[in-house]
Amino acid sequence: MSLSKKTKIITIILISLAFAGYGVYNYTYKAHKTIDELELKYSGTSEVFLKKIKTNAKHWQNVVVQLNGTITAKDNKGITLNHSTYCQLDDVALLPSLEIAQKVTIKGRMIGYDDLLEEVKIDQTIIKN
Amino acid sequence: MKTLILLLALLITSFASAQKYFTKTGTTAFKASVEAFEPIEAVNESTTAILNTQTGAIATLLFVKAFHFEIALMEEHFNENYMDSDKFPKATFKGQLDGFSMDLLSNADKEFTLKGILTIRGKTKAIETVAKIKNGDGNITLVSSFSVSPHDFDIAIPNIVRTKIAKDITIKLCYELVQKN
């Protein structure tokens, strides 16, 4: 049994509509990118990074950074590196394993320089070592 | 004499700093949903808030890009098309709790009038609302809400989405403040 021309055209239209619909859905409901999927813009010590921010704060907003530093404080959501960089953890269950004075490498998203508390603010932090 | 003055100055500063309660991870959420459409709401869990318990003065600061939406594309549009957050990364609120005193707080909510200036996209708006405050285990919890309109901050909503975004946007705050050393 061969399909009529009309049926073929309708089938092709329906299939392309289904593909288009799938594409639109994927575009609209695409997932958030994780920290590891985003491009790393700075890697180094938290002190040097602080100096860079102080000279050009706007350039460093909303970028992924990897920082080395010493933990100087802890609260129930994150850690502070070298008295100047607050890192809000992605997974707070890691907090008990982090100690004050411990050296760590973190990766997270720099959200901005908090001038109320005069510190760098990083969220979605993951511990690299 | 100089040492005495220095000592006094040191004492005063340590006394003054002991009067501050703060958080770095306060929750600020907003809702601009219209029924029957995709919910438009986002949460910022990295809000800095400082309360001077001697004067009742409040200062808060948040980064617009730290608002998290359920839908990634909505977050992109929010930052690029509406909030222009590359140009205006911060939103701030500076205000005052009327008649605030630590002595009035207990572990039950107490209501205070909160007045202040909200700055978004470099535009300011006077806010007056009620804040519920309690003091439990040495931590102060401040909960409040108020509404604003996109128009207040010169945020243009294109015609095509106008019916899907609420005219009044409700902003809710919940800050758990701990004593600042």
Image: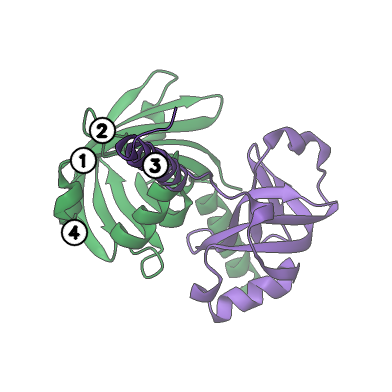
* Pointer 3 and pointer 1 on the same chain: no
Q: Position of residue B6 (x, y in %)?
A: 61, 68
Q: Amino acid at mark 2?
A: Phe
Q: Which residue is mark 1?
A: B164
Q: Residues within 10 Å of mark 3 (few under 14, many from 20)?
A: few
Q: Secondary structure at mark 2?
A: loop
Figure colour scheme: by chain
Which chain, by letter, is purple? A
Q: Amino acid at mark 1?
A: Lys
Are the residues at dot 1 and dot 4 in contact (C-beta closer than 8 Å)?
no
Q: Amino acid at mark 4?
A: Ala
Are the residues at dot 2 and dot 1 in contact (C-beta closer than 8 Å)?
yes
Badge 1 or badge 4: first in the primary sequence: 4
Note whether A59 is above or below B158 in the view shown: below
Q: Which numbered disc covers residue B156?
A: 4
Q: Which residue is mark 3?
A: A12
Q: Secondary structure at mark 3?
A: helix
Q: Which chain letter matches label 1?
A: B
Q: Please name the residue shown 15% across and 41% down the image.
A: B163
Extreme-bottom residue of the structure: A55
Which chain, by letter, is green? B
Question: B15 and A34: which one is in front?
Answer: A34
Q: Amino acid at mark 3?
A: Ile
Q: Quadrant of the N terminus of chain B?
A: bottom right
Question: B57 and B153: which one is in front?
Answer: B153
* Pointer 2 and pointer 3 on the same chain: no
